[in-house]
């Protein structure tokens, strides 16, 4: 029999067990998966050759004769990860050992089993104490994300590594673009995208301080912020009342000699009129940044030759597109985002700015992939200066961890079903609220868009019964979450009133944000209406038909309350 310290994880042992009648013994093959020297015990997982009987189990790992250092099996078998026992070492005799790569897989599977057991417990306890509040957004996670997180943690790599590289590749394949760079948030993606357009590498096409970028005021703040942060001038164009997106018919009148780019979002996942916006960009030679943070999976069909349509995902039409993987979004990493482009030069610029501004493109943990690390000349540095410490841009560190990327990979596999669930929930709400169009402006898509909505926007029409505040308070009191349309009108926000931000509205002259008047705001009438009267409701995949019907029911109850003015 084996001595106390002769056995280690990865050893295959025969375990002699006494049957209940104590008249006979049975030998069972097991895998050592742990050893506790303080308690003098081995942790074993049972092996079985009954493959057909157990192969459907969630926690099994197949083994063949090639997986052993010594051939002890004449047929394939399974490790039963969830059949764990602890025994004294003297009851075991070593008969073989697993190869290292297979042992790694088995021990990871054992870690998955431990995590899954805790997750099952946690779900049960949370279900008992959970309330019935309906949040406007949320994340849908299960053991797949947990297992991915465990694997990334076991790697102990921490920063961008194998999961990060896979995510960039698979996300690019999903979108159908050449280049994707993962970043730590959608806001960072926006900052990175606009900063890249100011790079000296673009020559005369680069944006310079004082150049203008067309956008909208009914936006999330970090779509507008990078324009100001880079010393550029935002030019605000009004939105359409039903789509909540830029009115493309008003863009032309906002263009001046200094206009160099358009930076706009597909608001709440609703596609802006891509065809008309691209026509303007082509005509006036403008860059287009698509803020696609709320619109992953949305599609738009461009007219092509022979009366056909070219249907593509949003985020593939502009020079650069940005994405967010915050928990509220279509997929999540916890915190995270990405930029995408088909332009290899822009991709290289963004890689530099994302990674501290360095000129070197070696992946994390790799050196001298170009073979010229100490044989180049840059700037006025000494000849042969280490290329890893040459900086061609003023950059940031906007990278993600491998742990985040691991979550993103698991979420990406679920994206198709998330897309369908959002579409289903949107239709349920839309069909249910059509009966109340006397009071509401319901959302509408412009052009040939096929949106995957982030939320369901509603604008309360002017009426004698109620206003937005009354309705929102009622819904929140009845456990239905609501949100405003982001900044509403960002020009009315404290950040614009408390700073002297140079800007224009439509075809106006240069204005200062702290000097704006009500007459200035009137140039954006639909934007102001959204700020005054619009809100949105949740349709994320964690909600179901019953939830949608409850929301419709409660809105109906509110409108038809006895005593409410007609």
Image: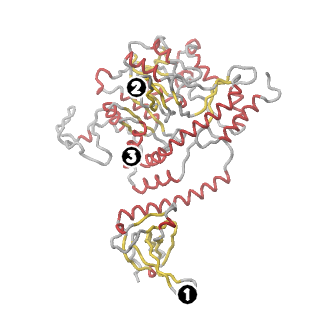
Find disc 2 in the rendering and name its residue.
230
Find disc 3 in the rendering and name its residue.
166
Residue 374 visible in the picture: yes
Residue 210 visible in the picture: no
Looking at the picture, does residue 37 appear above or below residue 194? Answer: below
- Residue at disc 1, secondary structure: loop
Quadrant into which the N terminus falls: bottom left
Number of residues whose C-alpha sits closer than 10 Å to that of mark 3, classed few (under 14), some (14–19) or many (20 or more): some
Query: Depth check: 246 or 157 in front?
Result: 246
Quarter of the view holding residue 545:
top right
- Residue at disc 3, secondary structure: helix
Query: Depth check: 52 or 146 in front?
Result: 52
Q: Disc 3 versus disc 1: distance between alpha carbons?
A: 55 Å
Query: Depth check: 85 or 39 in front?
Result: 85
Find disc 1 in the rendering and name its residue.
22
- Residue at disc 2, secondary structure: loop
Q: Looking at the picture, how far across and down is residue 249, in whole percent?
A: 50, 15
Q: Residue furthest front?
A: 306
Looking at the picture, does residue 521 appear above or below residue 165? Answer: above
Q: Residue at x 46, y 34 (%)?
A: 187
Q: Are marks 3 and 1 in contact (CB under 8 Å)?
A: no
Q: Looking at the picture, how far across and down is residue 208, in whole percent?
A: 35, 21
Q: Residue at x 56, y 56 (%)?
A: 119
Q: Which residue is drawn at 72% across and 37% down?
A: 477
In the drawing, does residue 433 fall left or right of residue 34?
right
Number of residues whose C-alpha sits closer than 10 Å to that of mark 2, classed few (under 14), some (14–19) or many (20 or more): some
Q: Disc 1 versus disc 2: distance between alpha carbons?
A: 82 Å
């Amino acid at each position: 029999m084996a001595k106390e310290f002769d056995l280690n994880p990865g050893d295959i042992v025969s375990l002699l067990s006494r049957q209940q009648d104590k008249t006979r013994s049975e030998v069972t093959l097991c895998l050592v998966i742990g050893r506790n020297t303080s308690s003098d015990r081995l942790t074993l997982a049972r092996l079985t050759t009954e493959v057909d009987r157990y192969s459907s189990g969630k926690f099994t790992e197949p083994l063949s004769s090639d997986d052993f250092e010594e051939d002890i099996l004449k047929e394939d078998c399974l490790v039963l990860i969830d059949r764990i026992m602890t025994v004294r070492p003297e009851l075991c005799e070593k008969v073989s050992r697993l190869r290292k790569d297979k042992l790694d897989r088995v021990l990871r599977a054992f870690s998955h089993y431990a995590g899954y057991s805790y997750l099952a417990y946690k779900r049960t306890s949370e279900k008992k104490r959970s309330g019935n509040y309906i949040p406007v957004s949320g994340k849908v996670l299960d053991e797949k994300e947990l297992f991915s997180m465990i694997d990334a943690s076991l790697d102990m790599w921490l920063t961008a590594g194998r999961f990060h590289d896979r995510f960039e590749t698979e996300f690019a394949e999903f979108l159908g673009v050449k280049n994707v760079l993962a970043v730590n948030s959608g806001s960072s993606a926006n900052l990175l995208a606009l900063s890249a357009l100011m790079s000296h590498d673009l020559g005369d096409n680069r944006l310079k301080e004082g150049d203008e970028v067309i956008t909208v005021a009914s936006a999330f703040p970090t779509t507008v912020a990078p324009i100001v942060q880079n010393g550029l001038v935002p030019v605000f164009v009004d939105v359409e009342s039903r789509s909540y997106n830029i009115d493309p018919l008003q863009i032309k009148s906002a263009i001046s000699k200094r206009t160099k780019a358009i930076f706009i979002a597909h608001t709440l996942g609703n596609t802006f009129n891509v065809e008309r916006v691209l026509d303007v960009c082509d005509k006036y030679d403008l860059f287009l940044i698509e803020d696609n943070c709320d619109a992953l999976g949305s599609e738009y069909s461009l007219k092509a030759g022979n009366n056909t349509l070219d249907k593509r995902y949003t985020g593939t039409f502009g020079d650069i597109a940005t994405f967010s993987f915050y928990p509220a979004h279509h997929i999540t990493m916890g915190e995270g985002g990405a930029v995408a482009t088909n332009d290899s030069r822009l991709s290289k610029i963004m890689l530099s700015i994302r990674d501290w501004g360095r000129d070197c493109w070696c992946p994390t943990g790799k050196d001298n992939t170009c073979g010229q690390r100490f044989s180049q000349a840059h700037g006025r540095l000494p000849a042969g200066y280490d290329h890893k410490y040459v900086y061609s841009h003023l950059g940031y560190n906007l990278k993600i961890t491998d742990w985040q990327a691991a979550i993103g990979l698991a979420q990406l596999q679920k994206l198709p079903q998330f897309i369908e669930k959002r579409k289903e929930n949107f239709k349920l709400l839309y069909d249910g609220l059509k009966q109340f169009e006397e009071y509401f402006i319901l959302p509408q898509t412009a052009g040939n868009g096929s949106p995957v909505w982030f939320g369901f926007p509603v604008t309360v029409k002017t009426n004698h019964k109620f206003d937005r505040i009354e309705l929102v308070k009622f819904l929140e009191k009845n456990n239905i979450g609501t949100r405003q349309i982001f900044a509403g009108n960002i020009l009315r926000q404290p950040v614009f009133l408390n700073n002297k931000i140079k800007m224009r509205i439509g075809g106006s002259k240069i204005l200062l944000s702290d000097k704006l008047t009500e007459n200035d705001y009137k140039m954006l009438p639909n934007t102001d209406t959204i700020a005054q009267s619009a809100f949105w409701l949740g349709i994320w995949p964690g909600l179901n038909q019953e939830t949608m019907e409850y929301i419709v029911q409660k809105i109906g109850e509110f409108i038809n309350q006895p005593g409410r003015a007609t």
